[in-house]
Amino acid sequence: MFKKSLRREEKVSGFLFVVPCMLQFLFFFLLPLGLCVYASFTDWNVLVRDKTFLGLANFAELFRDPKFWIALRNTFYMMIPIPIYMTLGLLFAMACNKKIRGEKVFRVIYYVPYISSVVALVLIWKWLFNSEFGLVNQFLGLFGIEGPNWMSDPVWTRRMIVIMIAWKMIGITAIYFLASLKNLPAEYYEAAMIDGATGFQQFKRITLPLLTPIIFYLLTVNVIGSLQTFIEVNLFTSDGGRGYGVATVVYYIWQKAFNYSQMGYACAAAVVFGLMILVLTLLQFRISNKWVYEGE
């Protein structure tokens, strides 16, 4: 009898521990997701209470809108920084993994951009890349090079955002890599040195394969994050740039929902874009078996 009572108490206690997570999942994921899917089939204006059922009309209009395809192209363009900051982050992590002087100071310096306010960073970059008095164009002028109009030309604005994102993400990427490097088994390197392996051979045959799990994790998370680029676009441009050349899909959804009050249409775009991210993520998991080292 005592054992049954104890088991019952354990089950109740376990359930009570799980309840907050279940409620959070229900109210902050399942219900909003269900509302979004339902609203995508309606003509929902946030200023009007009633919703008119439209069927697939929102989706048909979405695929006919050239701005959506431009925004989708720009969204995939924002994935360019990923290989840049992952490569530089790995190099910085390997440098910090060595016992060098000022190692801790160096870690703080390259981590500061990540923890800094995005608004502050954008203001700094707007000042640096100002076509009239920006330091970048002034530096190029020293070599007789006429700097581009970074803020007015969508092509250069996209490039500027790519550079800023890459610079901002190096620090946190290096921290992940550094933590992984600290946990690599030392005996592998000892055996490699006994066999006469060079530093590059050790990196290629030991370090890189053992880092593939964290590389896969960072690649998956960063791809999802890059596809959701919004704040930088919204701060650098007020309307998506000339010819909508800077806008991303998330910016497109936000503009339709809150600037034009087309919440149903915005939900349809969000559903389509969410499915795209899901398919891309599943594809990454599918091909991960071919290159991610799982260990023995």
Image (cartoon, helix red, strand yellow):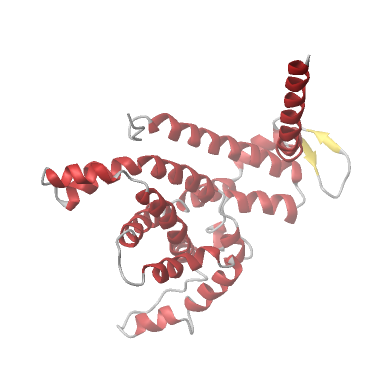
Tell me if I can see residue 41 in this picture: no
Residue in view at x 17 percent, y 44 percent:
192
> Where does residue 266 sit, x and y in percent of width and height?
69, 44
The picture quadrant where one finds residue 21 is top right
Q: In the rendered view of the protein, which quadrant contains the N terminus?
A: top right
Residue in view at x 84 percent, y 37 percent:
51
Q: Residue furthest right?
A: 49
Q: In the rendered view of the protein, which quadrant contains the C terminus?
A: top left
Q: In the image, 18: left or right of 102?
A: right
Q: In the image, 269: left or right of 226?
A: right
Tell me if I can see residue 51 in this picture: yes
Q: Residue furthest front?
A: 2
Residue in view at x 37 percent, y 52 percent:
83
> Where does residue 197 sit, x and y in percent of width and height?
14, 46
Against 117, is 79 above or below? above
Q: Of 58 and 169, which appears nearest the observer?
A: 169
Q: Of 94 and 32, which appears nearest the observer?
A: 94
Q: In the image, 204: left or right of 96?
A: left
Q: Residue furthest top?
A: 1
Q: Of 125 and 212, which appears nearest the observer?
A: 212
Against 170, is 37 above or below? above
> Where does residue 221 sit, x and y in percent of width and height?
50, 45
The picture quadrant where one finds residue 265 is top right
